[in-house]
Image (cartoon, rainbow, N blue to C red):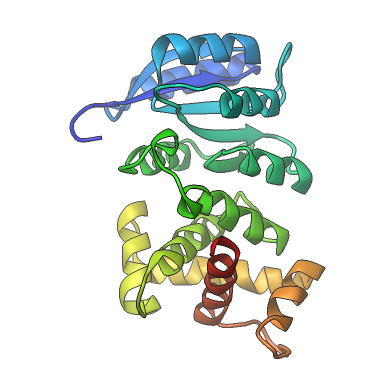
Amino acid sequence: MGEKPIRLLIAEDNGPLCEILKTFFSMTPEVELCGTVGDGESALKQIARTQPDVLLLDIIMPSMDGLAVLEKLRQTPMEKKPFVIVTSAVGQEAVTNRALSLGASYYMIKPYNLPDLLSRVCLIASREENPAETSGPMQELRPVIARKIIECGMTTNTKGYQYCIESVDILARSEQHCPIVKEVYWAVARKYETTPQCVESALRQAIRRVYQLNNAAFQELVRSEGSLLTKPPSNGRFLTMLSERIKMNIR
C-alpha cells in the first residue's frame, strides 16, 4: 500500500460499536475511513461508490446479512474488490466456514481488541495481489487454511489462530524446505510486530487446546500422517501436517 492510507469501509449494525470504531480509526494515520453503514444493502452500494481496500463486515445485519453481502460480492464483477474481515458475536463453526469459503480473509469474534483489529486490517491490505486480480489454486489458499484450522477446533479469537494461518501459508507456498524456528516464526513476528518467542508460545498453547479437544477433523489429520499421538504435537509437526494437507488439496 506504500504511503497511502488504507481505505476502510465499516458495515456494522451495532450503533455504539460503530461510533467506537469511527473514533478509533480516526486516530490511526494508517487508515482512512471511507464510510460506515448499518445494513448489507447499504454496504454494497458504498463498496461500489467508494472502492475500499478493506471491508469490516458484521454478520448480523438487517435487510441483508454479512453472508449475503459476501455472496453478492462473489457474484458481481468488479474492477476492485475489497478484502473482507468478518466479525460476529456468534462463533458457530458453520457460519465461520461459510464466510471463509465465500472469500472472507479473516473472521474475528466479538468483542475484539481494537489494536488487534488494526493489525489485521494492515496485514491483509499489505498483500500485493487483490483477490479479483489473481487466479489459480493459490487464490483461495488463506480461506482454505483458516477453514481447516477451525475444523480442527482452534478458536478464532486467539493470537495462535492468526499465527497458525500465517505459518501454514508460508510453508504451503514455499517450494523448498523452510525452517520453522529460523524463518517462519521470524516472518510471522515481523508482520505482527512481536517476537518469535511470543509466536512460538501462542502456537503451542493453541495446538495444545486442539489436541485436548481431539475432534474428528484433528484425528483425521493425524491419521493421514500414519501415526497416533500420545501427547500434543510439536508446533513444527502440526504446522507441517497442515501445510502438507493444504498443498494436497490445491494441487
Counting every numbered tag in the picture gives 0
Can residue 39 be seen here? The reply is no
Residue occupying the point 50% across, 22% down: 77
Residue lying at the far left in this picture: please name it: 3
Question: Which corner quadrant holds the C terminus?
Answer: bottom right
Residue 109, given in percent of the width and then of the height, sits at 64, 41
Observer-nearest of 40 and 153 = 40
In the picture, residue 60 is in which quadrant? top right
Can residue 67 be seen here? The reply is yes
Question: Which corner quadrant holds the N terminus?
Answer: top left
Observer-nearest of 22 and 172 = 172
| 103 w.r.t. 189: above or below | above
Residue 130, given in percent of the width and then of the height, sits at 38, 37
Observer-nearest of 64 and 18 = 64
Residue 68, given in percent of the width and then of the height, sits at 69, 24
Residue occupying the point 42% across, 36% down: 121
In the picture, residue 153 is in which quadrant? bottom right
Residue occupying the point 53% across, 67% down: 247
Residue occupying the point 70% across, 46% down: 97
Q: In the image, 16: left or right of 219? A: left
Residue lying at the far right in this picture: please name it: 216
Observer-nearest of 94 and 225 = 225
| 250 w.r.t. 117: above or below | below
Residue 227, given in percent of the width and then of the height, sits at 70, 91
Q: In the image, 36: left or right of 156? A: left
In the picture, residue 206 is in which quadrant? bottom right
| 123 w.r.t. 199: above or below | above
